[in-house]
Image (tube, helix red, strand yellow):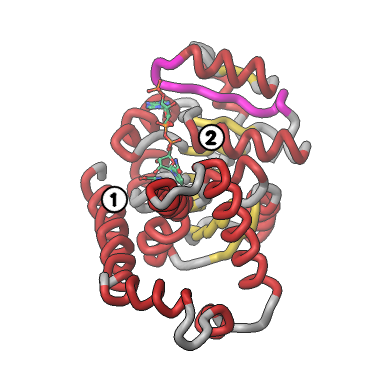
Amino acid sequence: MKTIVFVGAGSMAQAMIHGWMKEATVSPENVYIMNKSDQEKLASLNETYGVQLVCENREIVKTADLVILAMKPKDVQDGMNSIAAYLPPTAVVLSILAGVPMDTIEQGLGKRPIARCMPNTSASIGMSASAVAWNDKMESKEKAEIIQLLKTIGSVIEVEEDELHVITALSGSGPAYVYYFVEAFEKAAVASGISSQVARELLVQTIAGSAEMLKQSNETPATLRKQVTSPGGTTEAGIEALQESGFADILARCLNEAATRSRELGKRYI
Ligand SMILES: NC(=O)C1=CN([C@@H]2O[C@H](COP(=O)(O)OP(=O)(O)OC[C@H]3O[C@@H](n4cnc5c(N)ncnc54)[C@H](OP(=O)(O)O)[C@@H]3O)[C@@H](O)[C@H]2O)C=CC1
Ligand SMILES: O=C(O)[C@@H]1CCC=N1
């Protein structure tokens, strides 16, 4: 995959570019970026990473080996229209759009090898949890190249396309839930007399440590939770408050609402 063209250079494209440049996976001379109108963002990415600008020179799309669709779902048709006439038949397409099915992309850009991936913003530090699905045109060599690219920005698992709605709700949106959790806990700690600095430092390390425990130990989350929970102790009191407040139901609702939105996005922009 020598020449890569990003159609849409926003937050997620930047996270991926940052990850690739940090790991020197891709050479910046081979990465082209385009936006709808935000030239300032393009100039800033050019200055920071040395990546190239498509600008008015759409001819460059003719040299693309890999095109990454990274605009918002509402812009998918415009974005595809802007490159369709230039896209060579050999180019592979990787979409990171929430909800939008590969069928829609095949209709806009022709039957060709297409991958649909759901990364997350932790790509910028090489910690994305990415899931990827393929259409039936994708050959194993192209799959391997895309997996290799995705591995340099974090972990990758191969899934079926219809699983991506729930995955988008879980790990695509997931960082936002964790940040919201930290915001809420920090606010509660400050209200209870701890400084936000102390609360943040302890919370962040607690999350990082717990994530590592989940990765490194062979125990289930429930067993690890029980190891913290002394009978009649503080954790038990805290967990009871979560249970009485319907915490598990709240998270189930969060996941369902986000997955439903992903399905709706897919239908809205066909
Ligand atoms: N943010 C996240 O955490 C994640 C996002 N995603 C998916 O990634 C995609 C991008 O999200 P995100 O980076 O947050 O969005 P941003 O709004 O930050 O970036 C979208 C970019 O697309 C550009 N764009 C819009 N229309 C066109 C067009 N017709 N041609 C070329 N470029 C265009 C915009 O340019 P301009 O500003 O000029 O309009 C903008 O720079 C979405 O589909 C989202 O579902 C997936 C995983 C995680
Ligand atoms: O909120 C969104 O729609 C995108 C998809 C996953 C994360 N951000």
Q: Residue furthest right?
A: 24
Q: Would you call the spot at circle 2 few (<14 residues within 10 Å), some (14-19), or many (20 or more)?
A: many
Is residue 49 in view? Answer: yes
Is residue 176 in view? Answer: no
Q: Secondary structure at mark 2?
A: helix
Q: What is the spatial separation of the Cα atoms under label 1 and label 2, in whole angstroms?
A: 20 Å
Q: Which residues are magenta?
A: 28-38
Tell me if 49 is positioned left or right of 237 in this view: right
Nearer to me, 118 or 197: 197
For mark 2, what is the residue?
Answer: 13
| Identity, as a three-letter code, of the amino acid under mark 2 | Ala
Q: Quadrant of residue 259?
A: bottom left
Q: Quadrant of ligand 1?
A: top left
Tell me if 58 is positioned left or right of 79 in this view: right
List x then y, in percent, for residue 26: 73, 36
List x then y, in percent, for residue 146: 63, 51
Q: Quadrant of residue 91?
A: top right
Nearer to me, 112 or 55: 55
Disc 2 under 8 Å from ligand 1? The reply is: yes
